[in-house]
Image: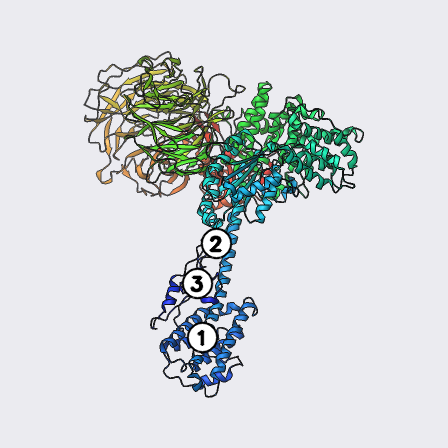
Amino acid sequence: MKGKFKKVKIPNFRSLWRRGPSRELLPVNVPPTGRSTDSQSAPTTQSPKDSQSASTTEQPTDPQLAPPAEIPPDSHSKPPTEIRTNSQSKPPPELGSNDSGSGADIEEQAQNQPQKNVSIPWKAMRTALRALEKNSGGLPPLKAAVGLLVACLDLTIDVIHNREEYEKLARELEATANDLEPYAKQLMERGDGGSVARIIKSINEELTQIKDKLGRGKFKRAMDASEDKDDIVNRYRKIDSLFRRLLSDLSLRTHIEILKLREATDTILLNTLEPEHDARYNSNHSITAGRRACTETTREQILQDLRQWADGADGADSKVFWINGMAGTGKTTILYSFCQWLEGQKRLGASFFCNRTSAGCRDPDRIACSLAYQLAHYSPALRSRLWRILTEKQSPHKLDVRQQLELVLQQPLQESKTAIPDGVIIVIDALDECDKAEVTSVFLETLIKLCVDLPVKFLLSSRPEIVIQDKMQGPVLLPSIIRLHEIKSSFVEADIKKYLEEELGTLSPPPCTDDIDLLTMRSGTLFIYAATVVRYLKPGPRVKTNWRDRLHVITGITPSSSNLLYKDLDALYTTVLSTAFANDALEEKELEDGSLILSTVVSAMEPMTAKTLSAILGLQHENVTNALSRLQSVLHVQEGPTGLVSILHASFPDFMFDKSRSLRFHCDPGEFHGKLSCFCFGVMAKELHFNICGLETSFLFDSNVPDLQQKIERNISDALFYSCRHWGNHLVKGSFAENIHTKLIYFLETHVLFWMEVLNVTRHITTGPKLLLNALNWLKKNNLELKDRKKLYDAKEFVEAFSMNTCNKSTPHIYISALPFCYKSNFVYANYWTKTQGLIRVNGSSLNEKRSGPIATWYMDYDVISLASSHSGTSFATGSYDGVRIYDADSGEMIAGPFKASGRPSGYLVTFSPDNTKLAYVCGDTICIWDVQTGNLTPGPLLKHTTNFASFSFSSDSKKLVSVAYDGTSIVWDCLTGNILSGPFESTDFVKAVGFTPDGFKIVSVSGIRQICLWDAEKGAILSGPFEAISTEHENGSWYAVALSSDRSNVAMGFSSGTILIIDASTGAVVIGPFPCNESVHELAFSHDGRKLFSRHESGFRVWNAQTGTLETRLVAKSKPGHFAVVPTPDGNKIISAPENNFRNNSEIVIWNTTNDDAVVAGSPNLPANGSIKSSVSSLVYSPDGRTIAAAFEDGCIGLWDAQTGKEILPSFQPHPREGRISISFSPDGANLVTHSTPSITAVRLWDSRTGKMIGEMLAEPSEMLGPVEALTHSHDGSKIAWSVRQSIPTPVASPSLTPPSSSPFEEYEEMSNDDKSKEYEDLLYTNTIRIWDLRSGRIIEKQIEGLIGGNISHVAFSPDDIILVLGSEGGELIMLSVDACEVIWRTPCSVRLLESVTSMAFSQDGTRFACGLNRDQLSVWNTTAKEMIPFKLCRARSQNAIDFIAFLTDGKKILTVDTSWLGTDSICLWDVETGDILVNFDMPYYLGSAAVAAAPGCSQLATSTHEKGIRTWEIEDVLASLQEMVVERIRSEFDNEDSSDSAFYSPQSVKLAMSRIANYHGDGWVKVDDRNIFWTLPDFRETLCYAYNPLIIGPYGMTLMDYSNMDLCIGKKWVNCWLAQ
């Protein structure tokens, strides 16, 4: 609780606790003070009695009674200052005047008394007392008392003849004075009255007695009497005790302050449990809920039985007592009375009364923490234990109920059981009224399991519902049970009669005995009947009625219900409603309104106030309150400001919804839920609007918005809040009506974004997709038009993408980010985009159509090595080297973990049990099974296998586990005990998959040689098989993937050849397949229902229909996926996956939606939009006019695109028959392309750039290999092509071999036949040759380069006049050749030879200078005329990057470079040739990583490859012009000023500069400028996001166009201007 409390200085009383007991004068709870000794004094002796007493002093055990030497660590940020307690004397202080008038004569005698034979201890004592006297000036009585004490002691020196006793007394008084002196002033903090004054008075009384004895005449003779001497010594010792009482007062004060701090800490920590206070039996909500005690003398036998059970009388030692009964049998009233009795006996540990009318009281997730909160106030010992747990485990109320019960109930109760008195009871009422049946069942099951060892008992009540009944009658526990509806009716009738007599006895005159008897008879065993009668006859002071008339109506009714059990209750309800809706007393409109209000209350998803009812139903508030006043016999209106309206008893909705019981008052659930959805649509249409909470800026997350809660309360009414959260819940339960359909479509077209605002700002955004799914199911159920279903499906996807990603941190970014980056084919974008302005504009084909990308990405700070989904789909688990963790499948928040067996790595294989209660994981040869809810290891580790595990699986009842190791041994384990049930069984081969059949008696296994066996799970005998699952004709690969269906009837197999088959597990016959798959299959998994099959490939995932084998969805991943798991969802399945081969010590969890709604998907599965780009770019080149970009790819293909629009000009084709890195170059006129491929032995080919037809080729010899892709270039006049050749042996000059052009631009060409093409060249000696192909004559000129340092020629370049050809090597050597003669005219001298590999080269336009880029960010410039290096700053030491591109600007005075690295920051630099200074340094917002780079003529534009298989263009002229003179501080200042300007938009120039220089691109999708959130992007769009000065991206999914120069943005405080539609 750091920072919650101010620092306080407290005494250090450690020494006081170390002293012996403080005798009878100290308070009972105050630890005794200690004894400190002067270092120069002799050791103090101690009597055996004192020694024994001191040694037996015990330390306090309760933390709240412990010595206050330390403040709890959460109370202060720094340790408190300690108080000195050593008894070493201070320097003698200067003695001042004595203010005391009493004892002046004694002091005078003491001053005149000669001090002879005074010991050192006596001097030290006097010094200490004088110091105490001086420090007691603020308390005159104490100062006077100390002065008198010193005087008396000086006169007593000669009285005490026993030196040992004399020194002992001196040391005791000295120690007390030294301990008390620093804190004497604190004694005045609470005045001079009370206990302190009384202690000082007692000291003075003792001193007066001593003074009297010392002041007698002839005192020496009198002192010789031993009794006087002993009396004086005893009085001194009593004075010492009194002084120590003052010290104890200080100790207690400090202890109290510590306790106050502890109590404040406790309060804050306990409040983190978020208890539901309304659920306490006697809370203020109890009146609203209608709770009350039994009428005096009623239900006595039941209450007596409960008391006996609580006392353990008559062998009643059951830990649980269950009262069950039908609705209306008085369960709550009985438990209320029993709680009163328990509280009177100080035995009520805690209570929780469930109630449908309160959201908190009906939530089973709130029970455990609420009980713990009350128990902490009941037992200080338990509170101390719970305090420790809460400091270690934050937010326990967010855990599941199992873990809550273990953490906040079981653990603290067990740790404090010795301090819990016998007979403590915890009461839980009406469990059947909880609204989460599954959670309630788990809660009850866990409670019954844990309660056996707890020091308390539990009293529960509920209806006899099957879920509760099964748990209560299970084998684990035999509770005491009372069934109220089975109690002899005469006993119940007697109690009901007493109740009626008491309640109706206040009527004047009271009903006669016959009437009471008749009402008692009608009530039967249902107290609710009697209670309803009382409310009907006594409706309250606000309703004037004639009770006699009403009684006559009741006694005259005739039951007509078909349900005999409730016939009297039904008749009563009918009578009450008949009175409330009497036709002769009300107008038709009043009757209609009353019926509408009544139906709304019983159908509502949660209680509403009268004000909310009037707003939702469109009625006058007065009309609502009038109608409610007539219905108070069956409804309850809470008093006070909330005024919640709720049903009185759960039996009333049952009556209303059953037409056979309620007859004319029947409320049709389907019809009325439909009406309520219409009312919700009406409220939203009326109240929703843009920026409903008035959020001022888009730069802040919602959590940082000041006064957000107040904004919500002011702007979002209760009616709107209810409508936004429940319209879909009412709709899906409602019947179809055309007007509902119309309102739904209107809502989708006009208010979806506003509705998202309300949900997000109130943190209910995860409700949105569920409500839209409900609406989608409602449309499907009623077979409505596909176009409307598409609208809902698109809206659901839009809301889901927003809710599952970090964009939901800021509500304004529904508009700022989610809408601009939504696919343009999505209905939400198409419908709402035109209603906005000033948003980021994203054009191009990449966002035109939805692609099956991930819907969310969650980042983990560890390496995920395995994944598993729970069978319920609510959670998933990750395995890693440091443990297993469990996460919520909707939000990605961690629920539990990490689980790890001590000393063992973990997480290689992970799986959930079918009942979702257990999690098993495998590491090597070890299995661990964890309880998901408690985190306990149950059992394990399981060690029996001798080799690592290959597979394991739970049985369908979750009680058994079968495991199989790589050596083929299988073992069946008991999941509860960890015992081996059967096995080990030996298999003939490695087993890849294993699983139990549904009955749990048989095991299906699939071996590494594709054999399927059916085993007896108990004996290990093969029951059928092995079946040879597949013939070799279907399988070409050396490995395969396998998956078992959940019912073990089918086995799926996938092979490296791309084949997928589904095989019958009982026969081995192929059921379906082969599937049409052209990729290697890495992993397979069936959906939990067995209807879908999921396959993992290098490119992503595919979803197949497991019944037909048809491909339904293809999901393309940006990186190779690794482990994955299938998560079942209400509308299908999701995939969660982690990347493969992750070496960053962290992982991304990627979530994919696999559902293809039939209203949306048609035709083939989703594939990449740009078929031309399938792999990484190997080289780039601009056409001479700068209008076209040509790119070559690692897969051997090339393509051409428009440099401005990204439109494809020439479809992709493969210029060379083998894959390899392609080099491309345009001819000067742009008409032709020249290509060659490495490292293959291939040809140099010439192509028509407009048609893609090959013009000719130059083949390499068999012993030759072409050089790197950069070592090929066109001459400036287009007449020559130069390239490097790597030769194994000298070969004769090859004659040109021109191949006739083909008619097809995409025809592949065969190379010259060569039987030795596969021969390895690594062991041969190579030489480098430069060849120049004269395209006009066809002549080949070549030059063998000898003595080349570094091996290969890496780059070649023609001079502007095409006279010189410059070569650069991997060893840093430069060589000049004459083009005509192909002779070496210059080589770099050894003295100036470069040390790094040449990575780029370029000439200035006039040819006088030549520059080359090197590794490690080095740049060298040469004078081509003088053949010498120009002095230049070679290394800027900015990074270790390589300069991958270099070019002279047109003036020849500046050089443009691009340096790249896989690890560093890539940048574009402008260098001054004369000075070597960097004029502009533009850091790329992403890394290129050994990228291909090309520049348009004049360096106006730059193209770079990306690691995401794409091409980015950069406006270099804009970069240089904008950034050359701009400094970061100025850019930041101008951006800051935009928020306060009068303009409606941020200026494009300011945004562009900020985005280029000071923006940060975060991994979670947020783009920020400092701490301001500019925008957020979808996970699957981040690799295609354009940056500042990067207007175009060409990628696998099409092109993206974003020009920040033309964007007037509404961001920051200007975001409020983005909405146009009114």
The color scheme shown is rainbow
Q: Which element carries disc 2, helix, strand or loop?
A: loop
Judge left or right: residue 394 versus residue 1378: right
Q: Quadrant of residue 614?
A: top right
Q: Position of residue 490 (x, y in %)?
A: 65, 34
**Residue nearer the viewer, 1425 or 790:** 790
Q: Which amino acid type is shown beneath numbered disc 3?
A: Phe
- Disc 3 marks which residue? 13
Q: Residue 75 got which mark?
A: 2
Instruction: Determine whether label 1 and label 2 are within 8 Å by CB.
Output: no
Whichever of callouts 1 and 3 sits on the residue coming sooner in the sequence is 3
Numbered disc 1: secondary structure: helix
Q: On screen, 206 above or below 1039?
A: below
Evaluate whether residue 1084 shows in this view. yes
CA distance separating discs 1 and 3 = 26 Å
Residue type at mark 2 is Ser
Q: Judge by depth and name the residue closer to the eye, 1149 or 596.
A: 596
In depth, the one of 1333 and 676 nearer the eye is 676
* Furthest-front residue in this view: 314
Taking the spot 46% from the left edge, 52% from the top edge, the residue there is 74
Q: Earlier in the sequence, mark 1 or mark 2?
A: 2
Comparing marks 1 and 2, which lies closer to the viewer? 1
Q: How far apart, in angstroms, are the residues tagged by discs 3 and 2?
A: 19 Å
Camera-near label (3 vs 2) is 3
**In the image, residue 507 above or below residue 1343:** below
Tell how many labels.
3
Q: In the drawing, does residue 1350 fall left or right of residue 1017?
A: left
Mark 1 surroundings: few (<14), some (14-19) or many (≥20) residues within 10 A = few
Find disc 1 in the rendering and name its residue.
234
Q: Residues within 10 Å of mark 2 (few under 14, many from 20)?
A: many
